[in-house]
Amino acid sequence: MSRELVSANHAAGWAVILAGRANRRGRGFGSGVYPITPQTECIELLCAHEIEKGQVVRVESEHSAMGVCIGFSTAGLRSFTASSSNGLAYMTENVFAAGYSRLPIVMMAVNRTVGPPWNIWADHGDTLALRDAGWIQFYCEDNQEVGDTTLLAFRLAEDKRVMLPAMVCQDAFILSHTMTPTEIPEQEAVDRFLPPLDLPHRIGAHPRVIGHLDMPHETEAHRAQHAEAMTSVEAVYSEIQESFESHFGRRPPDPIVPYRMEDAEIVLVTMGTTAATARRAVDAAREKGIRAGALRVRLFRPFPAAAIERALRGRRVGVVDRDCSPGSGGILWSEVCSAAPSATLIQNYMIGVGGGDIRPHHITRILDDLGARERAGTPVFMEIG
Amino acid sequence: MAEPLLGGMAQTAADRSEPILRCGNTNCGGCGMSIVHQFLGRAAGDRPVQLVIPTCCAIVAAGPFPWSSYGAPVVATTFASGASVATALAWAAKLNGEKTRVICFAGDGGTFDIGMATVSGAAERNEDILYLCYDNEIYGNTGGQRSSATPRGAATTTTPTGNELAKKDIVGIMAAHRIPYVATVSLAHPDDALRKMRDALDMEGFRFLHVLSPCPTGWKSEPGDGVELIRLAVKSGLYPIYEVFGGRRFVINVEPEMTPGALENYHAKQGRFRKAGIDLSRVREAIADEWDYLRARAAQGAARNA
Ligand code: SF4
């Protein structure tokens, strides 16, 4: 284990290089890559390192990047790509194809505003638009978490009880380009943690069609199996947390991460880096005698609805969305509403949409507003100036 | 040159023991793509193959889950992803020391149109793929809309009074990528067709075969006329049969007889040309122009070789 000063892009990149090399004992590693700000450093790192029994194909579009990953994965190889924003939007058709083909591809997605208007800063709308593509989705808070989650995502995705692709999301620039000291594991430890991929439906020499026509009742059955695989993710993930800790000495965070929740009356629900700012604002509120708490949603698909329901019982809730679904409101908010106990006061605050810097005093304003509310109103945009 | 019997070929000892496309598939009667598969099965012999088929009639032909009309492993892909998925299968075989030949089997929609960037990318990277485009000059799978492979004058459901635009020169485009091998394949010239398919299967790098594929449903022609139509297309010079090595050396494989009446017959036998009232003198001009170009390129190639 070595401690390096790296950006989250490189933390993810190192995890992929190690995971790719680990499958030299299996059918190898393959990746299709295409640049887009702010994920490019990740694939540059990948392209600069030799991976035994591995191939990185520099393709002509994001759509083909995922096409290549689909091909590698179908042939039983470990596979990875990275993308962001409009790149993800362009890739979308094949993101769905990978999901519905139950291919355990891992993708690192840097959350960036979808244009136009063109904007390279953090916004969760790009990956949230892919929430129905059948992928597992994690949203990370710091560089260590990005690296660790990328690594464990392979184990989770490739577990026979799961067999689903996984997306590891992180906030543009706030993480992608910010260097922090990060533990990079040794190859031998990764080799022990990550068994070779054995894809049950891989294409081989036998006549069969992968991805063919389905009648309605069969598609329904396939979707039901897919949904069922999603429901096993949380249990498998908790096993992986244990295993990860025993191999690397640190425990990856739970699907939801509470902060000062024990006696909290008002709670802010966040995703990604906003959680760190929310903690600061909660501390400040506590000093003023306000019983505030925060809850970070780390696993968005499958949505940990039962855990969220338990966590929000009897609280007044503010959901902080760094995204906007026009005509509805924050996407995290609508998901939290579906999981929270009925009659919970849940107010939606859309803030930092398009990447504006969310500061502690912005979150304090949200806490003040939430504390003063008798009932929830329509979702509000919080201007951050 | 020998021509196929009964408009197709019977299974013989020379063929792949398991046909690539089995009986009982859902192709229309007289579909040229069925004949392409018969040729491919004979050409492939016992080579291990994997097929990548982007959205087109050829994937509908596979039939619904859990059956498969294909006697070979097939990966069905999204419309524009044939060449990208095939790229990965070829690398996967190489990394694992497998002899599998990866064949991307796509229609004109997936090649000339929506898949163009993907095909160009894979060709530019010289991926180890045999890319076979069976070109029925129409979106057949969706019921017969114009593609950029549709010839001028053909009526389609989206050009009901006849297509006004000329067919895209896909062979020229692929040759411009300077890939190892590009060839046109005539279903009416089985010796030449099989030789090209075998050569292309054995070569390394990106190889592109273009096969004009009769589509009775879209061409409004008799199902039994398919091979005859291709013969007429070749005889009239409308479908030049040639190959290009490395994007530079052009070799003409079949000299068109320019038989009187061949061009008239080719058009008269297809309902799709009847509506627009096609101007054959214009078609003749285009054919003459194309042959001038091809002969000049072939002569250059011969001179360089001498
Ligand atoms: S529509 Fe044309 S290409 Fe498609 S199966 Fe029928 S004849 Fe063949």
Image: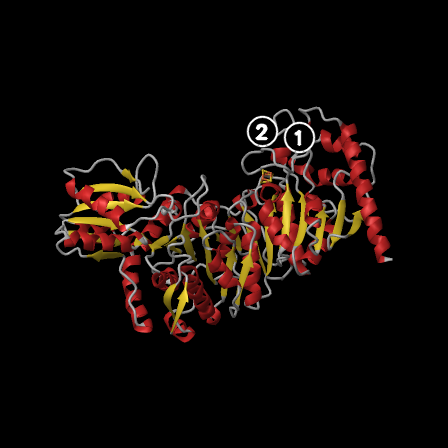
Image spot of residue B239 (x, y percent): 74, 41
Q: Is residue B253 left or right of residue A343?
A: right
Amino acid found under the numbered disc labelled 1: Ala
Name the colouring of the figure: secondary structure
Q: Is residue A294 left or right of residue A98?
A: left
Label 1 belongs to which residue?
B154
Image spot of residue A291 (x, y percent): 14, 51
Q: Are marks 2 and 1 on the same chain?
A: yes
Label 2 belongs to which residue?
B157
Residue at (64, 33) in percent of width and height: B219
Image spot of residue B157 (x, y percent): 58, 29
Kindly identify which numbered label has been placed on residue A307: none
Looking at the image, residue B159 lies above or below residue A256: above
Residue at (28, 67) in percent of width and height: A251
Residue A316 picture quarter: top left
Q: Is mark 2 within 8 Å of ligand 1?
A: no
Image spot of residue B292 (x, y percent): 82, 41
Disc 2 crowd, CA 10 A, few/some/many (<14, 14-19, 20+): some
The number of callouts visible is 2
Q: Nearer the viewer, residue B149 or A108?
A: A108
Disc 1 crowd, CA 10 A, few/some/many (<14, 14-19, 20+): many
Quarter of the rendered image showing ligand 1: top right
**Subunit of label 1:** B
Residue at (31, 65) in percent of width and height: A240
